[in-house]
Amino acid sequence: MAQVEATTERTIAAKPDDVFDALADYSGTRRTVLPEQYSEYEVREGGDGDGTVVHWKLQATSKRVRDCLLDVKEPSDGELVETDRNSSMVTTWTVTPAGQGGARVQVRTVWNGAGGIGGFFERTFAPKGLARIHDQTLAKLAAALEK
């Protein structure tokens, strides 16, 4: 099994602390900026950053739906790590300052891919699809914060 990785980033014209706080607000802002590929969203514990447990279904393709139950940690300033209890998937959100008072947000998701021919297609196509989904999330986050 090879590790599969999807990464995307965006600069948002808002203060880094405000961007991070919005991402960490699982009981409020986060729910509103997720694109249509997410369903059955539910905060099960916490709701604000470290210690949150959140559930959702992610429709990665027309045939592939992941049932995700995520533990959220804040290992350092500006970093949220979502670890899926149901798979090897880990998503790291990193918010750093960008010029003119803006924020750079990078999203990196890694997981252990399948082997064989299925794994080849997963490594080839899944990162692009997931990066598009994350980019939609970041676009909605930017729209919410850049008002």
Image (cartoon, rainbow, N blue to C red):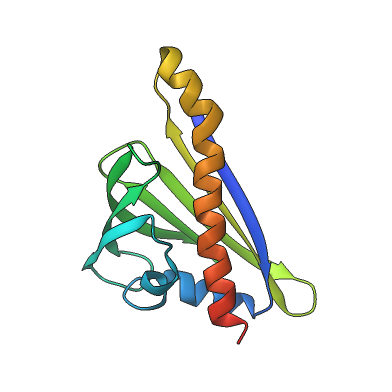
Q: Is residue 52 above or below residue 62?
A: below
In this rendering, position of residue 99 left or right of residue 42: right
Residue 86 vs residue 62, the one in the foreground: 62
What is the quadrant of residue 29 in the picture? bottom left
In this rendering, position of residue 144 left or right of residue 97: left
Q: Position of residue 40 (x, y in %)?
A: 23, 60
Q: Position of residue 114 (x, y in %)?
A: 39, 22
Q: Residue at x 23, y 65 (%)?
A: 42
Q: Residue furthest right?
A: 99
Q: Is residue 49 above or below residue 28?
A: above
What is the quadrant of residue 1 in the picture? top left
Q: Position of residue 58 (x, y in %)?
A: 34, 50
Q: Residue at x 45, y 49 (%)?
A: 91
Q: Residue furthest bottom?
A: 147
Q: Position of residue 59 (x, y in %)?
A: 35, 47
Residue 141 in sight from this viewpoint: yes
Residue 78 in sight from this viewpoint: no
